[in-house]
Image (cartoon, coloured by chain):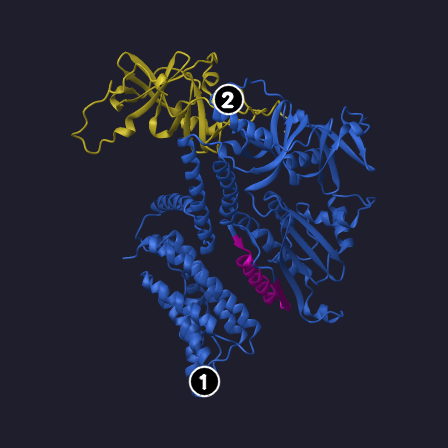
Amino acid sequence: MIDPEIVEIFLEEAADIVSSWEKECLKLEKEIDNPKFDGIFRCAHNIKGSAKSVGLDEFGNFVHKIEDVINLLKSGEVVLVPKLVEFLLTAHSVMVGWIEGLRKDIEYKPQTDNVLKTIDDIKAYVAKQSEGFTVNWKNFGTVAVESGEVTEEQVARAVLLQQRKLGEIMVDEGMIAKEAIGKILDVQEKNNEKAQSSKKSTETIRIAANKIDKLIQLIGELSIHQSIISHSKSTGTLDSYICGNAINLAEKINSEIQTQALSLRMVPLENLFQRVERIIRDIARSQGKKVKVHIKGSDVELDKTVIEQITDPLIHIVRNAVDHGIETVEERAQTTKSEFANITILGIQDATGIGIIVKDDGRGLHRKKIVDKAIKMGIISAEDHLSQNEVYQLIFHPGFSTAAQITDVSGRGVGMDVVKQAVNQVGGHLAIESEEGSGSTFTVNLPTTLSIIDGLIVEVSGNKYIVPLMDLAEIIDLNEFKMENTGSGDMMLNLRGKIVPVESLENYFPKSKKRVVFKKKRGTRAEKEQAVIHEEKKIVTAGEIGRPALILELGMDKIAFAIDSIIAQQQIVVRPLNEQLAHLAGYNGGTIMADGDAGMIIALKDIARRYIEECHK
Amino acid sequence: MSDSRSNLDNDLVRKNHSKDESYDENKYKYLLFTVGDELFGVPLMGVREVVEPQPIKPLPNTIDHFLGVINIRGEIVGVVDLRIRFSHEPKDSALMAMIIFESAVGPIAALVDKVESVSVIDDEDVDKNPNISSNFPIEYLIGIGKIKDRLVTLINLNKVLGVETLNKFRASRV
């Protein structure tokens, strides 16, 4: 009997092992002349043992067969050739698929025939070799045709049959009526949807044990101080030095717990980078390009959700780098570059957040090609004089692709705009640097975590809102500028030589005509004290600024939003909005303000973007 | 919330179903509340909690009966004024309460004039096809329940509130 819960644990573990399996494969490939098989052998052995112990015998047997091959490699009976690394990676893909499948359906079993066939071939090869023969790998069909038992057409038909869906076969065999299939498919779909959605809530995360230890220790400390405080309360000595001290310490520990708790969501970039390395390798191989991948900073940690969000964009960037950026071997031979192209994947952490850099030494972005294409598409006109950066921004235009030929890897022009969107969505920023002939660098800047941001509390038409500080380029005082009419009733000003439109945020967030129904009751003394404390904590940045305006920078454009006043700057714990509130236009999150009321975070960037798009129309 | 408890006693309509083992009383429990002078009932299973009216943070550019957001223990929840939604005069009183519904799109708070009670209303006491008109889609109407001398409009409010959009597009530049 297979216990689903235990299988769950196994799958977590297996996913980890399989991931190191991939890493070992990539290592083997680099050291193909002097390979060490201990790592991959350990992986195979562990996964086999775990699979069998939870009752997944088929999985275990499959890995066991691969282990046989690794044994042959270890003993030196078979020499490691690129094709064998390929085989080990194929086995990896099968296992990944298997694990994914098992998550949804405990009975899942993938198609393993190809891999098993290869294993048999390898074993047969070893057996034959000792007799002095060499045999090329052939699949069943080829051998069958060669033996004259069947014709090629028959094999083709058999292959076709193999690919048929189970339902179709059942209908053909008369086991089931055609109409019933539709119903079954409906039920299956609904069931799988449910399985998928229930899956979400049980999403798990692996956490380093020391992080939890630290958290437990902090909570222990906190409860000591808490007991001092409650003791003081019962003895009426809340004003004592000891109690004051305890309150201060509790506050400090509290903020540490917050930091620690948030760090639980942080995972290293290692897995992401490994996946990217594999993709680079696969594409380079399929296109016959020679690429060396350098990875640095894979220990940098990032919020798990952010990593999930940027996985696809990053994969797209490296695909482009290999497909468009890197020249073919022949092309490279005509330059002074070495035969091997270099792609560097870099993870860095600084004060503002995390940066992921993809750098290649390929042909770089072709300025003329991009401009020509943009003119042809009507995005710009031939008279436009664009700065280098403005030219690069063009590739983020929907439907833009300069690839002369569409390959199955990239070049359909759906891509860079989606990449940029996805990066922006997690509050990140995408930058390009490139030099024709010597390569391009894509930099993805990301906030470390989505959960805590620096926010500016501002007042607009009498209501308080929060604006993420990272959205803002600067804050100016409109009194220091001379505002001019634009001719269409709007205002503009001259900011260090750049013309900046001035929008009043009041137009976007007008005074609500609804009454605020309930004022907060501040009855008890404790609550009043609390309110005073929060009052004191405000870092008032207003005062000197008479008519503050927030300046946003979007690419080359700047826009100023006039507001009533700035109330404070503080750290904001972002609460995601539920589905109903998420549809409200103009906000991208909520928070609980210091006075305990709910507050909304304004999506100022979206508003600015929409304004600028409107202007360009 | 003891002050908003009602004169409709809990045990008014409880019947003896102990013989039938498959009978799940929770399925027939309704939370009764009044809006204006109308008595409504919602399935208790769709209700998360009932709270005192919380201070509301108003949001512009939204439909008239969407009052804004409140803080429910750190969670941000939207508030719908059922008095406006059901075309009643929004007159504040000490008995007002917020019912937090668990809808498909997350929790939603509904402001009502008074929470009456939790009552069991069996299927046989519910008229599923009443001859009345209603200002919300008929598919969300469960029926009209009969409790002693009163009639209760039974409605799947958690579902209705979940499908309503809150944006008021015309007035908005956003």
Residue A145 screen position, x and y as percent: 44, 74
The N terminus of chain A - image quarter: bottom left
The C terminus of chain A - image quarter: top right
Q: Nearer the viewer, mark 1 or mark 2?
A: 2
For residue A387, side relative to residue B101 (left or right): right
Q: Residue at x 66, y 39 (%)?
A: A471
Q: Is A155 included in the stretch rendered in magenta?
A: no
Give the camera-side residue of A168 and A214: A214
Give the camera-side residue of B152 and A513: A513
The answer to whether residue A590 shows anywhere in this view is yes
- The residue type indicated by label 2 comes to Lys
Q: Callout 2: few (<14), some (14-19), or many (20+) C-alpha neighbours within 10 Å?
A: few
- The residue type indicated by label 1 comes to Gln
For residue A471, above or below residue A404? above
Q: Which residues are magenta?
A: A267-295
Q: Are marks 1 and 2 on the same chain?
A: yes
Residue A579 screen position, x and y as percent: 49, 35
For residue A388, side relative to residue A86 (left or right): right
For residue A208, side relative to residue A546 (left or right): left
Q: Disc 1 versus disc 2: distance between alpha carbons?
A: 86 Å
Q: Which quadrant of the structure image shows residue A590?
A: top right
Circle 1 residue: A129
Q: Callout 1: few (<14), some (14-19), or many (20+) C-alpha neighbours within 10 Å?
A: some
**Which label was assigned to residue A520?**
2
Chain B in the picture: what colour?
yellow
